[in-house]
Amino acid sequence: MTAPRPVALITGCSSGIGRATALRLHEAGLRVVATARKPQTLAELAELGMETRALDLTDSDSVNAAVEAVNARHGGVDILVNNAGYGLSGTFEETELDRVRDQFETNVFGLVRLTQLVLPGMRQRGSGRVVNVSSIFGRYAVPGGGFYHASKHAVEALSDALRLEVAGFGIRVVVVEPGPVRTPWGQTFMDHLPAGAENSPYQRFHERMAEYYNAIYSHTRRSLAGTFAIEADQVAAVIEKAVRTRRPRARYPVGFLASSTLTLRRLAPDSVFDNTFVRRQFPVP
């Protein structure tokens, strides 16, 4: 008797990395449940034969309903890909605390709640895979992105703890760390850039931030990050590897910038990293 195909629940599938991952895992023969806040954005995936569902990580009822539906139809989730998230930009001093809370509700607390709901089934079956999409900014931070980067640092720490807690139950936890990716996420990040109020002491910094990220995602001028930015499918390929390999690594940096800058961060003292990399490659007030 043929074993049932594994069920993969993926968040944030409306575009970018989530959509590319859904396509890859579907083509690999997994039963994919593609989710997004707005299910109408998943119509193309549904036409390809994937199951699609609404899932808003900031809404507990939505998260509960999605997991209950998958459990009822498939008996549980074998693979969870926590991909959904967005980037909040702003200086530490000026960013409103409500915006910070919203950032963590999506990038951290929603991820935690969803993972908590699927873990009992994985534990009972004695197997499972949780893939958390982090970022190179889960390992270091630069000016203007501290709160987004803090949310990814949290994902990294939670993944480390969870990996050790559930390993004895046959569950593997993996972190994927992309560098800059050419996706609609870039426009989302641009939309969350602060306006740069007229009297702000950081006004010129905000303007330079907008120019910098526009250069990466819109190719308005050449930059290191723009030159080595990767495509969503490259990240999806690494996620597929993390899902399908028998013994996955704890972390998978994706792209030349990810590997090189994380190596530099690990080896260089803070002062060297700040002055030879951050101050030369990123806007600084």
Image (tube, rainbow, N blue to C red):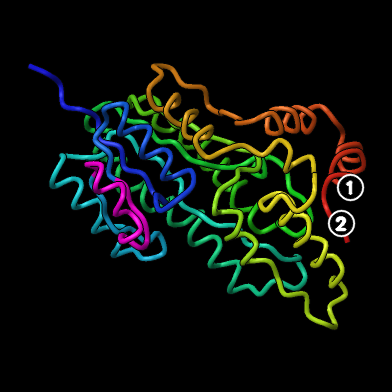
Read off the magenta span. 34-50
- Residue underneath mark 1: 279
**In the displayed structure, does residue 71 sit left or right of residue 97?**
left
Q: Residue furthest front?
A: 220
Q: Is residue 142 magenta?
A: no
Of the numbered discs 2 and 1, the one sitting upstream in the chain is: 1
The N terminus appears in which quarter of the rendering?
top left
Look at the picture and state if 169 lies above or below 105. Answer: above
Say whether marks 2 and 1 touch (CB < 8 Å). yes
Where residue 40 appears, as percent x and y from the top left, is 31, 61
**Image position of 207 (left or right of 246):** right
Residue at the location (37% across, 22% down)?
244
Whether the magenta-drawn stretch holds residue 43 is answered as: yes
Alpha carbon distance from label 2 to label 1: 6 Å
Picture layout, residue 40 above or below residue 245? below
Task: Write down the quadrant of residue 124 in the picture.
Answer: top left
Q: Secondary structure at mark 1?
A: helix
Return the residue at label 2.
Answer: 284
Q: Quadrant of residue 66?
A: bottom left
Q: Position of residue 109 (x, y in %)?
A: 46, 57
